[in-house]
Image (cartoon, rainbow, N blue to C red):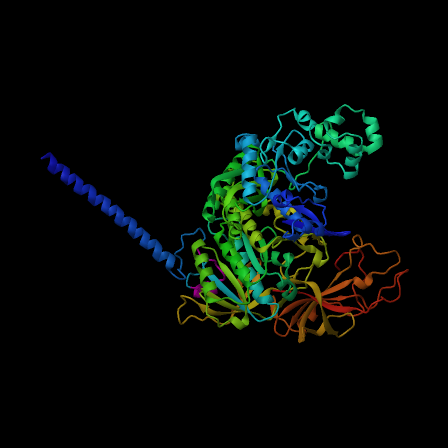
Amino acid sequence: MAVVMASHGGIRLAAVNPAAATAGLESGLTLAAARAVVPGLETVESDPHRDAETLSRVADWCGRYTPWTAPEPLDTAANGAGVWLDITGCAHLFGGEENLLADLLRNIKRQGFHVRAALADTPGAAWALARFGQTAKPHEPEIVDPGSHRLALRKLPVAALRITAAVNEGLDRLGLRRIGDLYDLPRAPLVARFGEALTQRLDQALGRLAEPVSPRSPVTPYRVRLAFPEAIGHLDDVAAGLHRLLDRLRQRLVHDRLGLRRAELTLYRVDGGVARAVVGTSRPVRDVAHLERLFADRLDSLDLGFGVEVMTIAAPVVEVMAAAQANLSHDLAKDEQTMQLGPLIDRLEMRLGRGSVVRLESRASYIPERAGLAVSALDNRADLRHGEDVAPALDHQTTDGRIMPTAPGGARPLRLFPLPQVIEAMAEVPDGPPVMFRWRRLLHKVVYAEGPERIAPEWWRDVAPPGEDRSHLTRDYYRIEDTDGRRFWLYREGLYDLPTMPDAIPSSPRAPRWFLHGVFA
Amino acid sequence: MASEAMAIHKAEADRVAKDQVLAGLRARIEGIEKAGKLGGQGHQAGRNASPLALTPDLDAILPDGGLTRGALHEVVGPPGAQGAAAGFAAALMGLAANNQDGQDGQGVVLWCRRHYDGQENGELYGPGLAAFGLGPERLLEVRAGRDHDVLWALEEGLQSTALCAVLGEVSDLSFTASRRLQLAAEARGVPALVLRHDSQSHAVSAAQTRWRVESEKTRWRVEPARNGTAGYDIRWKLNLLRCRGATADSQLEDWQVEWRDGHLHDCRGRQDSRIRTGNRTAPRDFAVVAKAGQRPGYPTEPGLAV
C-alpha cells in the first residue's frame, strides 16, 4: 500500500508501507512507475491536515508518560512524523527508561502505528537514532547511555542531522557520508560552504548547543497521575480514581499553602484517545468534596471509549491560600454560611456558563446606568460581605449638613432598561412633565409627576471636542404615576431653551426626546 | 442455678436490644412521615423554622402567623415589566435576608432570571434594590438561558446552606417543578419565591401561597420631596389567591400594604394627616415641578443633580 500525493509532474508516492518497501517501492516515485513494478498497488490520497491532527492526538496520548510532549512539525518530517517526549524525572515511575520505552512502544503499536523510538541526551541525537539507528533487533528501542551519544552518532549517515537534501548532497560529493566524519573538520570552511544550519544541527545533536522543545500544553508543577493495571470502563470507577487523585493533589497544595483556581482532568483511553474535563473555581480551593461535585457534572459527558488506562489531574492555575483561621469573636455558623457561597457560585457558573452569576455593585456616578453595575461574582476577590468597602456609595451633603445616600427608598427604580426605551410623550409646557405617553403601543395617562431631577453628562469621562455643546445630552428625570398606579421613570434628553451663556450655540442641535428608563416597585 | 440466672440475664438483654431496634424504627418512620408531608406547617427542623413576619393583619390570616420560611410562594402580577410584583417579591426577599431566625446577621439571597429578561423587562437595578435591603453584598443575580435552567438554579440554591432565600422569574412552572421546589424549600427551611405572569394565576401548583400584586395609587406625602428622597411611600394591593391551611372564613382579598422604612405596613383604615391620596392637583400645593420659565437653571456643576 502507498500514500499518494499530487505534486508537480504528476502523482507521486508520498509514503509506502513495509510490504511495498520490500517490493522495491520508495517515496518520490511516480504512481505510474510504481504501478509498473507492483500492478496491484493500493493507494490512498494523502491528507496533511489529518496527519497533523493524528500526530497531535498521539502527542496528547503520550502525555500519560510525561507532561512534556510536543508533535514535530510535519514539514520537517521527511523521514517520518515524530513526537518529542521529555521524560526527565519520569522514568522511575515506570521502572526505568527501558521499561518506559517498552511500555510506550507496546501500547502505541497496539493502536496500529509503526514506530521507532530512541532515547538520548539531546533531542537531535534521539531524532537521528530513531530514524537511522541500527540496533541488533529491528524495532527495538535504541537507548543511548548518558554521555555516549557522540559515539552512537558516529556511524550514522549525515542525513540524520536534520539537514536539507541540498546540504546532504553537497556533503556526499565531498565524501563526508557519516556524522563521525564531521567531528574533526575545521568549522569555518563548513560554515562558509553549507551555512550555519549544518554546524548548528551538529552542535545540537552533540549537546553543545541547547535546543529547547516547547511542550504542547503548558506544564504545571501540580500534576498527579494514576495508572490502572487494567483499563476501567465505568464512570463510578473513574469517580473513585478522581477522589484519590484529588486527595493527593490536596496534600501537595496544603504543603505549599496554595489553592487551585483551575483543574484539568485528563483520561488516557485504551484506544489512544484522550478525554478532558476542566473546571474553574471562584476562589482558591483545595476541598476534595467541592472539586468532586464540580467534576461530577462533567464526568457524564466524557467519552470513556473502551476503557481508561491512566488518568491525571493538573492544576494549571494556583493561588496562595492562607489557612482558614476560625474567628472566635464571630458566629461560627455564619462563617460557615459564607464559606458555602463559593462552591454554590462555582456550581452555577459551571452549568450556566461563565458570567452567569453576577453581583450588582454600586459605583460613584450620577448617571443612572453607571451607578449600578453588574460584575461577575467570580471576579470578586474580597468577601461578599465586604462589598460595601469595594464600591463606596455616592453620598451627597444636604444644606443642613446631613449626609444623604443618593438612592433612598423609591428614588431609584427597581428595574432599569439597559437601553432606554424611546416613547412618545406629550407635555403641557415644553419643558414640563408629560401628561400622557405611549410606550409599547400602550397609552399611559399621567396622574402624578415628580421632578425634574436634572443630570448633566459627566464632562470628565467622555471628553467632548472643544467648542462642542453637549447640553443636548442633559437629562431631566421625572417619576411618573399613571392611572393604574404604575410608576415609571421617564426622562427628557436635551433642553428646550438654553440659558444664555456667552459662548453657547443658540439652539441645541437636536430636538429633545423622551425616554422611559426604569420601572418603580 | 447458675444456668437459670444466665437465662434470665439473656432474656433481659434480648428485650433491651429489641426495644432499641423498635425505637430506631419508630424514629425512622417519623422521619419519613415528616419528609413526605406536603406543606408541613412549622415542622421544619431547620434553623429558619420560625415564620417571616409581614404585617400584623396579614400575619393574622396566614396559618403559621407569618410567611412560612420553608415553603414555596408564588407572586403573580400583571404582564409587562411587573414593577409592583417584583417590588413585593423584593420586599419579601429583603425581609428574609435581614431577619434570619436566631441571628442578628444578614444573609445572601439569590435572584434567578433569564438573561433576555433584562432587555425585555429591564435589568435588576442595584440602587433600587438597595432600598429593599438587598444591597450588593446581599444579592446574587443568576442569568440563565431558559426556564429550565432558572428552576435548576433555584433548586441548587436551596441545597446550599449559604442562602436565606431564593427567587426565580419564570414564564411557566409545572406542577412537578413546583412540588420539587416546595420539597427542597421545606428540607432547608428557606423560602423559595417564584415570580410569574398574571396569566398563570389559575395554574395548579404545590406552592403554599400565591399572591397577586398590583400597584395601588400612591399616597403622596404633603411635604415636598427633598434631596432625592421620594415624596411617597410604595404601596401595593395584595390578593392572596391561595393559601394552604387558611381558614375558610378569613378574608384573603384586597389588602393594602405599604413599604416604609424597611418594613411592610398595613394601610387599612389608616388615617394619617400627613398622607393624602394623590391626584394631579394635590402636589401642586408645593413646587415639586417648577413652572415653565422658572427652570432651576443650568447646572452649576456638571454631573450634579439639580
Which quadrant is the C terminus of chain A positioned in?
Answer: bottom right
A441 in relation to A333, above or below: below
Q: Is residue B251 left or right of residue A205?
A: left
x%, y% of residue B288? 71, 66
Return the residue nearer the eye: B39 or A248. Answer: A248
x%, y% of residue A340? 52, 47
Q: Which residues are magenta?
A: B50-62
* Residue A332 seen in the current view: yes
Return the residue nearer the eye: A63 or A27. Answer: A27
Q: Please report the residue visible at 72 percent of the width from the left and 71 percent of the height from the top.
A: A423
* Residue A285 seen in the current view: no
A438 in relation to A338, above or below: below
Return the residue nearer the eye: B301 or A22. Answer: A22
Q: Please report the residue visible at 26 percent of the width from the left and 47 percent of the height from the top.
A: B21
B38 in relation to A25, above or below: below
x%, y% of residue A466? 88, 56
